[in-house]
Amino acid sequence: MQVKRTIFREDHEILRVTARRFFERECLPRQAEWDKAGKVDRETWLKAGREGLLCTMIAEEYGGGGGDFGHAAVLTEEVHRAGVSGVGFGLHSDIIAMYINRLGTEEQKHLWLPSICKGETILAIAMSEPGGGSDLKSLRTTAVRDGNEYVINGSKTFISNAMNCDMVVLACKTDPSAGAKGVSLIVVEADRLGFSRGRKLEKVGQPASDTGELFFDNVRVPVSNLLGEEGKGFIYMMEELPTERLYIALYAAVQLERLLELTLAYVKDRKAFGQTIWDFQNTKFKLADAKAASVAVRTMVDYYISERMQRRLTVEEAAIAKLYATETLWKHLDDMVQLHGGYGYMLEYPVARAFVDLRVSRVVGGANEVQRDLIARKL
């Protein structure tokens, strides 16, 4: 049984065909190369831009695709359905670029977005710091006004696209005494004097994702690099985080479907004790549970995609989607690794690769404990 989906239009499905071909043709064959290099090559970024697979929600006048959330959702589904790991296109296009699109002045958007949409300028967003992850009110990185410039000092860690980025949307304190009301967002170009990259961090999974440290040592940027209003950065981040959490729930739904399909193929072929693994009742029951969970997650996520397309998604709903989808994925992924036996521990098998790559889904975008707290506030 497949869940009947009604949320996507014909133009969404046309993009899906293009995206599926691109990820299968241009990305999967390069996965091992990217894993070894620790980042995605820039030529693939440029190819994605030429194919119209970056910044699909940005207006055409700024170089984007002029689409809606449905187009971005299709791209998220297809990169994960292909099993491509560590590509930062979605973060760049659908999270960070959207800060500039929503908060930027016309001058800023015309200056920055065209090269961002082409993949010539790669974006990172710098929130997390060595002393704290999800606690964005307690940032220590500062931006002190000095005439027509901000002087920035501080450090960031766990930053995706850190090694590749040309531009950073930085969360920092413009008023350290004001708590959350002192947080601002400032764009920092990577060629600014005093900006430097630290270690490329060695993660459990997703080696092609160039996650690293960023340092700011008296970095000077013009006041015109401020995004939105000074002191409203925390509010801006809180407004964007629900969409990021829905993306995480979305790829959890896709991965659960994909891994169930791969596991079914494996257990129906693999033999033990004179029969296939599928013939054991334990296998059938485990995968029946996984199928039921997959349908439940997909139904929930599609509902919330529809809500987001109509701009009705709430903080609580995004937290529910992210929490339930990622916890459900993890439970059944663990079962599917077990059903593969020893091969489930071999990285050449997709289920093992998924096991190390997807553990972070319960942490990224706000740890699931944070999601539980958000949900509990509404009980």
Image: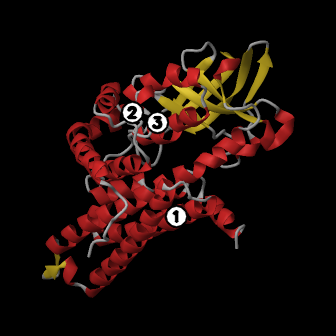
Q: Secondary structure at mark 2?
A: loop
Q: Secondary structure at mark 3?
A: helix
Q: Give me the residue at 37% from left, 36% from top.
A: 65
Q: Mark 3: few, some, or many residues within 10 Å (few <14, many ≥20)?
A: many
Residue 233 pos. (x, y %): 70, 38
Reply above or below: 223 against 307. Answer: above
Q: Which residue is mark 1?
A: 321
Q: Which residue is mark 2?
A: 39
Mark with earlier residue (2, 3): 2
Please say if the residues under marks 2 and 3 sit with CB atoms less than 8 Å apart: no
Q: CA distance from mark 3 to mark 1?
A: 22 Å
Q: Give me the residue at 54% from left, 64% from top.
A: 323
For residue 187, side relative to residue 255 (left or right): right
Q: Mark 2: few, some, or many residues within 10 Å (few <14, many ≥20)?
A: many
Q: CA distance from mark 2 to mark 3?
A: 14 Å
Reply above or below: 294 against 166. Answer: below
Q: Amino acid at mark 3?
A: His
Q: Which residue is mark 3?
A: 92
**Residue 121 visible in the current orientation:** no
Please say if the residues under marks 2 and 1 sit with CB atoms less than 8 Å apart: no
Q: Amino acid at mark 2?
A: Lys
